Image (cartoon, rainbow, N blue to C red):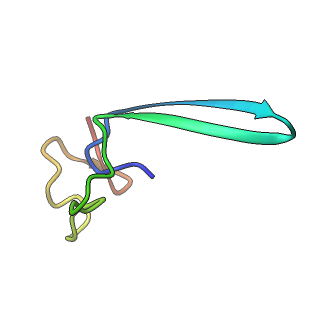
């Protein structure tokens, strides 16, 4: 699950004893207790540099 403020993500996949493991690291980190994954509001309403296909552009 990516958070609204993640700007980088890196993932790896590994097989071990017949199982597939996927691990991802995000920058900045997230999953903080009491914080929302995203803000509720109109699409692109807080994008400082505009919007493309419903996502803030960088």
* Residue at image point 27% right, 60% down: 38
* Residue at image point 33% right, 52% down: 31
- On the image, the x and y values in percent for residue 6 come to 31, 40
- On the image, the x and y values in percent for residue 53 come to 38, 53
Vertical position of residue 34 compared to residue 13: above or below: below
What residue occupies the far bottom of the structure in this picture?
A: 41
Viewer-closest of 52 and 29: 29
How many callouts does the rendering have? 0
- Name the quadrant containing residue 9: top left
Vertical position of residue 29 compared to residue 34: above or below: above
* Residue at image point 31% right, 39% down: 29
Vertical position of residue 17 compared to residue 41: above or below: above
* Residue at image point 12% right, 44% down: 48
In the drawing, does residue 11 fall left or right of residue 44?
Answer: right
* Quadrant (top left, top right, bottom left, bottom right) of the C terminus: top left
Vertical position of residue 50 compared to residue 8: above or below: below
What residue occupies the far right of the structure in this picture?
A: 18
- On the image, the x and y values in percent for residue 55 come to 33, 51
- Name the quadrant containing residue 15: top right
- On the image, the x and y values in percent for residue 8 come to 37, 31
């Amino acid at each position: 699950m990516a958070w609204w403020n993640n700007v980088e993500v890196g993932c790896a996949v590994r097989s071990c004893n017949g199982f597939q493991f996927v691990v991802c690291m995000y920058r900045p980190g997230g999953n903080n207790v009491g914080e929302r994954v995203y803000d509720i509001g109109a699409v692109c309403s807080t994008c400082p540099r505009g919007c493309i296909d419903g996502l803030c552009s960088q």
